[in-house]
Every structure is written in C-alpha cells, then in structure tokens.
Image (tube, rainbow, N blue to C red):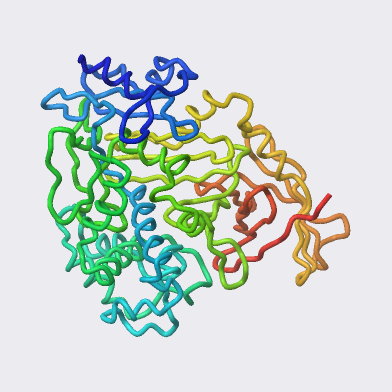
C-alpha cells in the first residue's frame, strides 16, 4: 500500500477489539489543516503531525514536513516524537493505578517511599508532587544554573543528586503551585521502588501494551533508535540543525509516541476504559486545591490535576497539556463535553502548537468555541474580597485586549479608582501604571480573580448577578 493511502486510511479508523474499523467522515478539509503546518519557504523542513478524535475515533490526520532531513523521511501517522511534558499524564496514570489498588498512599510522607530525600521542614506527599504543590525545586532549572545545556548528557543519578542537594522546599508544601519537573521525576522513582520494576517497563505493561500503543515507549537512559523516530530541529540561518538535546530520563518527560498511539489512547478514554477506569479518571481529572482552598494551577486559571491542566478555555471545559524541548513542541487538547480531542506534534522548535490545536478545534467545532471577544465579555463584572472590603469592577476589555477596571475600597474615592491593564506574557494582565505593578489573573469561568503585587496575592470572588 502506498504511504499516502496508508496515512489517509488510519485517519478514518478507530481501534476496536484490536482491529481498525471505519469511523465518522472527516469534518474539515485536510489541505486546509496542512496549510497551517506546512513550510512553503523551505523545500525540505521539519514539520508537524496533527490529529483529531471524536468520541474516541480518529476524524482527522494530517502531516507536513520531514521527520529526518538527511534521509528525507516524511512525517506520518507512525512517526515517533519526543513528547516532553505531555509525558506527565502517563506518569500520573501509573501513579493513579497504584493509588487505586492501594500500593501508594498519595497522602503519606513521600520519604516513606524515598527515604533519601531531605527531612523537609514540612511534609511533602506524592499527591503534592503530582499537582506541583510540593515546592521541590525544578531539576531542569537547577541543572541550567549549574551550567548544563544539553539535557541528554544528564543521567538519573546526577538528576537525583541535584534534587537531594536542596535541603528545603521553596515554600510550605500545599500552599502554592509551582511547576516542577522534579516532582514527576521523583514519582517515576517512587513507582520503581514500590513495584520493583523499571519505570519504563511499568508504563509499557500497564498502559502501552493494554491499549495497543505499538510505537510508544519510555526512555530509560539511552538515546532512542528506530526508523520511525523523528529528529528535532531548530532554524539556523537559512536552514535547520538537529537538536536532539532532550532528557533521556523519564517521569517529567521521556515518553516517545506517534499520533496513531494517541488514537488508541483516546479510544480508551472515551470507549474502552481498560486503563482509564472510573477511579483512575477521578484522580486524573480532579484539580488540586491549595491549603487556602484556592485552585492550584497556572496564571490563566486552569487547575492542575494528574499531569493535565483542567478548566475553562475557548468557552468550553478543557483538559490539556503542552510539551516542549529545544526542538520539539506539542499540544494535547481535549474538549470533554464535546467528545473532541486534538493533538499537534512538531519536531521543530519554532512552532507554537497551542494556537494550532485551537485553530483545528475551531475548524471542527465552528461557532461552538468562544471567540476572544466572548471570553473577555464573560469576565466583565464585580469581584470582591470581604476581609479587605475590596471590590474590583471589570468594566470592559477592549478589542486590543486592554482591560479597564475600577477599584473600590475604604482607601479609594467614593467613585472608585480607575485603572487600565494590558495583557502580559503569562495569560493575565499587568497594570499600565508603572508605580503599581499590579497583576490580574482570572480563574476558571471568571468565578474568581487573583490580584497580586510582588509576592502578595489577594483572591476576589465573582459577585453573582
């Protein structure tokens, strides 16, 4: 069978009883999607694989670019990409399985399983590692500060030494959210300790093999080989250079997979439930709460659950996670209420997969997804903090995304203090007043507003209309 025909064929299929059977008709023009990821400026360039799934069945598969420039090998449905932080959900999956069966106590002191860790002043638990609320410094940051630049040269022993060398957490565990690759590296080691098997083997036997993810594997210290493995590239001058500098250890990253693997993965989430059982799903899809009751998550208001960010975006409930190494960029987006998932896997460091995935989702969903204007309008209203007698009235968000607010408190005039905020680079807003560098972050569905200045943070709740 010709490569092109095989590529189209799998995209019209789903996994059922180990066989591929016909799925629903593709909803968008593949050439329109291909135009989003193609590089007309170069005769030979790296690129992306894009896939979409509806109800667990593939409805779209498009690829453009080369997996290997030297050998002129094109990207297709079975091209294997380094998944970077998209790997975290697979680490969380095996941890959730072990928690459900009672092998791991998510709320125990992590030193029960990893006694070589420092005796932190406050207890760190596996659940905190899972949700990035432990405060354990990020090993990638520690390595960079120590002069490392090629992550593939670091082994598991060196990484563990970096983590153990930090005697205390960065904050009281459970009180804040701070994304840390150390937490997921420690979870991988924890899995090895309680099961007595290598982490890569555990993922293979308890996730990949049961789901038929035949191309997927987990790195275990050695550089990946195989005809389907993509190189990563960065633009240099008028061309591209190989940058396979990603870490060869697992937990925080380390999964290698194809979009065909994700087809089987999606089928289990939506239909099969062999790995994604109800108890596992509950652990994977429940965002953490901080010790003050606030949502643990990124500044854009998406909470963090089991290796996945969950909340409201695009006018929909979303479940997503991006991934990035120097030359690989990925986004895995799910709209669970729509039964839709979109995956974008790129082997070039200058591609941003997040807007690509959003665009493909919009092409499939049309007017169902909110425009940025509709999202902004949903945030207009009053937010209050009773303890401070503080009220922020979000008056409008303009077409240029500038936000106009009026602040009311015992310290402002009766008419309030008007302020203007501009978008920042972290999904929120920063005051245009250079004297008061106040930042705003909206929580999911505009239910709350986080106001911060420096390290001080105040949370205001939306006033019901």
Q: Residue 389 vs residue 112: left or right?
A: right
State the quadrant of the N terminus.
Answer: top left
At horizontal 64% and vertical 53% (from top left) the residue drawn is 433
- Extreme-front residue of the structure: 17
At horizontal 16% and vertical 61% (from top left) the residue drawn is 155
Q: Position of residue 331 (x, y in %)?
A: 40, 40
In depth, the one of 198 and 76 nearer the eye is: 198
- The vertical placement of 39 against 274, above or below, is above
In depth, the one of 430 and 158 nearer the eye is: 158
In depth, the one of 206 and 160 nearer the eye is: 206
Q: Position of residue 209 (x, y in %)?
A: 26, 46
Give the total number of marks visible in the rendering: 0
Q: Position of residue 267 (x, y in %)?
A: 41, 38
- The vertical placement of 93 against 257, above or below, is below
At horizontal 13% and vertical 48% (from top left) the residue drawn is 223
In depth, the one of 420 and 335 nearer the eye is: 335
At horizontal 75% and vertical 65% (from top left) the residue drawn is 385
Q: Position of residue 21 (x, y in %)?
A: 37, 25
Residue 343 lies in quadrant:
top left
Residue 98 lies in quadrant:
bottom left
């Amino acid at each position: 069978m010709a490569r092109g025909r095989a590529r189209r064929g799998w995209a019209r299929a789903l996994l059922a009883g180990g066989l591929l059977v016909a799925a629903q008709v593709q909803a968008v023009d593949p050439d329109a999607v291909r135009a989003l990821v193609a590089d007309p400026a170069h005769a030979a360039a790296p690129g992306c694989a894009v896939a979409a799934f509806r109800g667990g069945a593939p409805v779209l598969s498009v690829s453009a670019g080369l997996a290997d420039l030297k050998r002129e090998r094109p990207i297709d449905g079975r091209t294997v990409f380094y998944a970077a932080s998209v790997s975290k959900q697979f680490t969380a999956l095996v941890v959730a399985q072990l928690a459900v069966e009672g092998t791991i106590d998510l709320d125990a002191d992590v030193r029960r399983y990893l006694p070589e860790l420092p005796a932190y002043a406050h207890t760190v638990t596996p659940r905190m590692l899972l949700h990035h609320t432990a405060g354990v410094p990020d090993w990638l940051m520690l390595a960079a500060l120590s002069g490392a630049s090629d992550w593939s040269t670091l082994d598991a022993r060196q990484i563990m030494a970096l983590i153990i060398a930090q005697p205390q957490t960065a904050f009281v565990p459970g009180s804040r959210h701070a994304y840390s690759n150390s937490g997921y590296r420690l979870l991988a080691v924890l899995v090895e300790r309680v099961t007595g098997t290598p982490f890569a083997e555990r993922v293979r036997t308890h996730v990949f093999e049961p789901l038929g993810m035949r191309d997927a594997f987990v790195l275990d210290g050695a550089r990946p080989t195989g005809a389907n493995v993509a190189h990563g590239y960065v633009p240099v001058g008028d061309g591209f250079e190989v940058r396979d500098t990603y870490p060869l250890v697992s937990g925080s990253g380390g999964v290698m997979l194809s979009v065909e693997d994700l087809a089987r993965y999606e089928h289990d989430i939506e239909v099969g439930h062999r790995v994604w059982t109800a108890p596992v799903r509950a652990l994977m899809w429940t965002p953490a709460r901080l010790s003050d009751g606030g949502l643990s998550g990124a500044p854009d208001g998406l909470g963090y659950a089991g290796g996945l960010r969950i909340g409201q975006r695009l006018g929909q409930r979303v479940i997503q996670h991006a991934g990035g190494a120097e030359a690989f960029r990925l986004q895995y987006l799910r709209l669970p209420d729509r039964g839709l998932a979109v995956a974008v896997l790129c082997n070039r460091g200058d591609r941003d997969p997040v807007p690509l995935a959003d665009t493909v989702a919009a092409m499939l969903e049309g007017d169902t997804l909110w425009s940025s204007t509709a999202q902004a309008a949903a945030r207009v209203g009053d937010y209050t903090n009773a303890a401070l007698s503080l009220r922020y009235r979000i008056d409008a968000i303009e077409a240029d995304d500038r936000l106009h607010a009026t602040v009311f408190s015992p310290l402002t005039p009766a008419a309030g203090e008007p302020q203007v905020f501009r978008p920042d680079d972290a999904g929120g807003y920063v005051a245009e007043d250079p004297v008061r560098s106040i930042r705003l972050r909206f929580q999911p569905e505009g239910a709350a507003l986080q106001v911060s200045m420096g390290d001080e943070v105040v949370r205001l709740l939306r006033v019901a209309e």
